[in-house]
Amino acid sequence: MFLKLGRIILVAAGIILAQGGMAYAQFSISGTVTDPGLTPVPNVDIFLYTAQGDPIGIPPTITDASGFYTITGLPSGTYGVGFEPSTASGLLVHYEPNVVVTSNVTLDVTLQQGYFLTGFVTDTFGVGIPDIDLNVYDQASGNKLVTPGDNTDATGFYEVVIPLGTFRLRWRAVNGEKLVPVELENITVNGDTSVSISMLPGFFVSGTVVDNLGQPVFDADLDFEDAITGQLIATPGDNTDVFGYYSAIIPAGFMNINVEPKVADKLVADEKYAVPISNDTVINFTLQAGVYVSGTVSAANGGAAVGGADIDVWDAVTHVKLTTPGDNTDALGQYLMVVPAGLLNIGYQPPVATLLAPIVLNNVNVVNDTIIDVTVPDGLLFSGTITGPSGLPAVGVDIDAEKSATGESVSLVGDATDASGVFAVVVEPGTYNIDYEPPLNLHLAPQKLLNLTLTTSTDIPISLDTGMLVSGIVRDSLGLPDPLVKVRALLSSTGDTVFTPANLTDGFGNYNIMLAPNTYDLVYTTDSLLPQVDTMFFASVPIYRDTILNVDFPAGQVGGGDSCCISPIRGNVDYDLGDNIDISDLVYLVDYMFVGGTPPPCFIEANINGYGGIDISDLVYLVDYMFTGGPAPVPCPLL
């Protein structure tokens, strides 16, 4: 790889080019540059490098009209020579390594035909942005391609020449503009290709990373993830410098920020969650000293080393997953990672192709540097293709497994469907409950498969039903968002509980669950310590389209739980100890609803029909029951 002329530095290696008399032999490298049709190519820039790839400053050298070039005044040695044709030629850059010079050398080069990668870079208003730098990386190797003239022009247009292949593209501002870099993965080029992007405005997030002694941490890597969507933000150049300083441009929103020091520093990685970014922000980190956990992962059958195994670590008490740089085994099955001292759960996950099953070591007490050698058992392949009702593949469906007998969660690798809706995981023979959890944007209902016995490799196709999104905000009796409220759905026709993963409200009281079209009883249960009802019950809610249902927990008796506060059925509005429904309950309800009377001590018993909150329908229901022989009040939920 070689660099542009503007970034060439002089290498002090005793190389002095044709400037006056020389006390040692001088040689030249010369030749002709042609295209695939052997036509000479003029105006190709020529660059010279040391054998190690360091650029050597030489006078500007380009091919003439005959494609000829010459570099003179070279002492004997080994060099690299770079050839950069103009973008308009459509020819690829070429680098010739290991050119041995002990006499004059003729180096003729044929440049290969490339393909144009072009596009526009615009802002959120569609206006072109000048001088945005494009970098192109080989997707497989990560090597950066040399792409002369890869900055956008005054209109935001760029044009570079690259070979066939699959690439990672990165655009970034280079003149201090607060624009969020853009990175696209797996861009396939099989001919001339156009890729245009829009760049968002952002804010500088910067700060320092120091260790527990206050010393700067050099080369710590920072990652920024959108706390709502989980999307990783492109932040080139986000490693700390020798002063422990970092800086990145981040869009507005809530960010999870992760700091990973080098394993050799023996410091514990750190993460801050849901950090609000609405202006330039300074966030500093102090990393704590950690301990090493190392060892070897081997196959139980034969003891062969297991390379590429991923190792995950959780706090055994809080079950929070820890960030552990260096947590993959090398080709010899060896690993070395830094963890905080304490009680940990450690999972070892071999690559799927090995057909070795993951294992988890629970409650490992790590106090000092610890060696843990493990053997992973033989497993079997459990795979399948997941589709929606239309037969189209369901992409990004998460697969979870637990042992049917114990409910113990099983660690899986490759547990999300690919672009074809296919997944493949390895488990030990046994009986499992399998969860299929599609992302909400697919509008597919989750599904749970119970008591699946696996004794040999098994492939099971799965079709998921169309889903309807039920969402809303849950607030407590003070009108504030109520986090960690559990939302449950029961089929009204049978009372069976429906599988609803991720059914807790977030820190803002928001919830989102996906249900197949049907009629449900919806139950909201809070752990709030406020004096309020702790369960709200909505009976026979028809869900045949996306539905927003906001819930406000009313003030009242604490401890109602999933049953009435005192009576076996609703209707004891005044909460008298006689446990009966009489005229005093009716008067109490009217007084509360129409003349500002005291709220019912137990809201769940005053919700006569068991649907929604307390309203006129409850009053009508109670009157009908008491005076015209109507149905009895709905029983409280027993869940």
Image (cartoon, grey):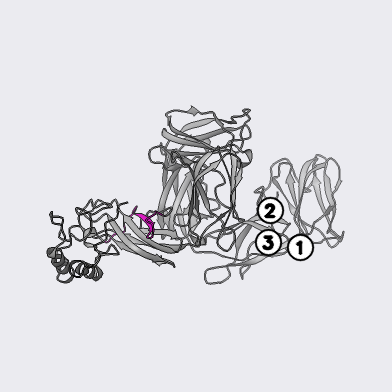
User: In the rendering, at what x and y percent does residue 105 appear?
Assistant: 85, 46
Quadrant in which residue 605 is drawn: bottom left
Q: Are marks 2 and 3 in contact (CB under 8 Å)?
A: no
Compared with residue 237, is residue 474 higher up or lower down, i.e. above or below?
A: below
How far is mark 1 from mark 3, CA to CA?
12 Å
Amino acid of disc 1: Gly
Which residue appears at 21% of the width and 68% of the height?
A: 629
Amino acid of disc 3: Gly
Which residue is labeled 1 in the image? Answer: 90
User: Furthest residue to the front?
Assistant: 629
State the extent of the magenta-drawn residues as a range: 479-497
Is there any visible trace of residue 243 in the rendered image?
no
Viewer-proximal residue, 146 or 241?
146
User: In the rendering, at what x and y percent does residue 325 appear?
Assistant: 52, 40
Structural crowding at the residue carrying mark 1, measured as other residues with C-alpha within 10 Å and reported as few (<14), some (14–19) or many (≥20): some
User: In the rendering, at what x and y percent does residue 132 appear?
Assistant: 59, 62
Is there any visible trace of residue 24 in the rendered image?
yes
Q: Are marks 2 and 1 in contact (CB under 8 Å)?
A: no
How far is mark 2 from mark 1, CA to CA?
15 Å
Which residue appears at 43% of the width and 52% of the height?
A: 501
How far is mark 2 from mark 3, CA to CA?
12 Å
Which residue appears at 36% of the width and 64% of the height?
A: 541
Q: Is residue 487 magenta?
A: yes
Which residue is labeled 3 in the image? Answer: 149
Q: Secondary structure at mark 2?
A: loop
Q: Secondary structure at mark 3?
A: loop
Q: Is residue 112 magenta?
A: no
Structural crowding at the residue carrying mark 2, measured as other residues with C-alpha within 10 Å and reported as few (<14), some (14–19) or many (≥20): some
Q: Are marks 1 and 3 in contact (CB under 8 Å)?
A: no
Residue 137 lies left or right of residue 283; in this view the side is right
